[in-house]
Amino acid sequence: MEVLRKNKFIEENKLQEKITKILKELDFQNTSKIINASEKIRYLILNASLSNEFIEEIMKEFKNLESEFVAVRSSATSEDSSDAAWAGQLESYLNTTEKNLLDNVKKCWASLFTPRAIIYRKEKDLNETQISVAVVVQKMIESECSGIAFSVHPVTQDRNQVIIEAGFGLGEAIVSGQITPDEYIVEKNSRKMINKKVVMQERGLYRDYNGGNEWKQISKVNGEKQVLSEAEIIELTELILRIEYHYGFPCDIEWAKEKGKFYIVQSRPITTLVNSNKDSFLEKKWTKIWTTEYSLFSVWLFGREYSEDCKNELGFGFEDIIFLVEGDLATVYRDNEKQKEFVQFLAEKSLMDPNFKERCLNIYYDLNRRLNEYIQLPEKTAIISENLEEFIKLHRKFIAYFLVPLWSPNGFDKFDVSEETKKSIYQEYETARKLTEHTYPEIEKFLQRIFLYISKKESITEKYLRALLPEELIEYSKTGKLPEENVLKERYDYCVLLSNLNENKIVLGKEGKEIIEKISAIDTKGISEIKGSIANKGKVIGNVRKIFMEKEMHTFNPEEILVTTMTRPEWLPIMKKAAGFITDAGGILSHAAIVSRELNKPCIIGTGTATQILKDGDLVELDANNGIVKILKSS
């Protein structure tokens, strides 16, 4: 049902001046005066009249719900923000009938001025902030059981734990603290139950068929039962993680179950978590890995894949990784020490565990085949929600197995294994890498087709659709609803994605730019040479040309030295013209390394800083015999 605003009601009844006067004269040190002020304001609101326009709109929408019982819930304009949850401060009225609907709407508005809400505003320094109350009227389900869930453990602050509280009947009994619920703790990564506390429940809050709620006794046999079964706990956990994934932050969730089906009735940020890891997060030694053409849609998935999915599929994932999206370009920063650990982990598993290699290659080829089948679908078919959800599952799983052949050989030299074994596995991985080198570029082109299709259909700027998140595209496929264009534009222009093992978080504007400035600062003064890894030997002198996007390729001249973060298959025409290649990222099975050997051109990879230090036109000596780039003359 449509949300109704208190402000209009206050204006129509000319109450604002009276309320302001009462609050201005308030002595917050005197509890009795706070109670007295509260009673005066709530009396004004409860005895004011609703306009015919309000009554007609409320009753019309109530009829559309086709439900005898509804929930009348309040939400302040500053409520449920990251630092002010208003938990329990405002009123909600469950199992409301048509008879008391209008009175309960006014009671919700009046609850902004209960003594506890007045004090809460003072504590949160919101007294000078214009706060209004929306009243949301929802169809009421008849809860068999219900409860609260947190996508991060609110006490231990363990971000790899989901905690669920469950009680029989309505969740109001738990929220109000009138019963002790069951408690289940589930590990996110494994989806395993790691702790369970089942509590005897003697009573529950249920619907009174005359309207409202009533307490009912629960028999000893039923009260001793576990409220949710093991399968239901895992099903609810999956829902909780989808919600956290959708919003990109830890969530405090209220849920209910009726006839075996779960309903989510509220979700808001967890406001009690200590943001103690932000500074240490930024103090890590970050390395710029690549900058290339990727949509935020893909980057969002990469964030989950490099961390959570690699952890789940392979047993090792990045604890933290940062992405910058600026228009059509995306840049990734990661902790170089963790990258080395990851490479060593994959190399050891590949060399020492034949079953690991075989399993990974089999899954890798299968996922690659299925992804390539999907991106051949017509746009109209591809964005059917079931197809989209399957695509996202394939995309998320693919990166883990893509990294096995890509990164493993970089760590082979650290292990005492026969050269014959190393060579054999290397050749298998090189074959796999070549077979799939076009997969990600083709996926990105496919996404561009999807964005163009939606752009034409919905009359929205195509490039801004690159900033859609996966869950938003799925939502569009189901409902036809897209985020506002200005929201997408802000993300597209400049946004930072902070990703760790448990969550993705988007940071916009000034805060995002400050993060990138802090982690990417590099002093280039006095640098005369850059070191990297040898991909193919040789030595050449030439002028630098930096390329990041396919549309820049026309600027490349024959015999220039290509400098980039990493190359892509569609860049082959300019790679044939280049004198040699220098990249920030990559291993011996990266695209640039493979092509340099095929074309027999000198190539240095993994410099980390070449694109930040070198400028277009610089004269350099690319000495790939020794892995050194010497700056002979700055442009």
Image (spheres, rainbow, N blue to C red):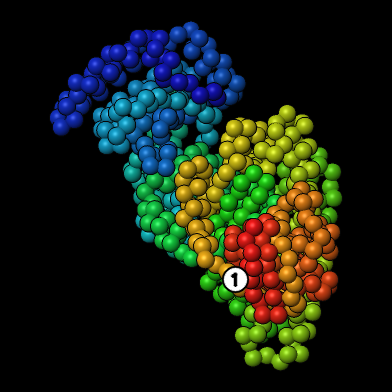
> Observer-nearest residue: 446 or 158?
446
Residue shown at the point (70%, 51%) measured from the top left: 293
Height in image: 126 above or below 434? above
Residue type, label 1:
Glu
Mark 1 lies on residue: 529
Q: Position of residue 552 (x, y in %)?
A: 75, 50
Quarter that holds the C terminus: bottom right
> Observer-nearest residue: 605 or 372?
605
Residue shown at the point (30%, 13%) measured from the top left: 17
Q: Position of residue 493 (x, y in %)?
A: 60, 41
User: Can I make out residue 573 in this image?
Assistant: yes
Sort mark 1 into few (<14), some (14-19) or many (20+) by Cα contacts within 10 Å.
Answer: some
Quarter that holds the N terminus: top right
Q: Quadrant location of residue 632?
A: bottom right
Single out the residue that lies furthest toward the top.
52
374 lies left or right of 90: right
Residue shown at the point (36%, 31%) measured from the top left: 90
User: Can I make out residue 236 in this image?
Assistant: no
405 lies left or right of 521: right
Height in image: 21 above or below 258? above
594 lies left or right of 45: right
Q: Position of residue 616 (x, y in %)?
A: 67, 56
Q: Secondary structure at mark 1?
A: strand
Height in image: 596 above or below 268? below
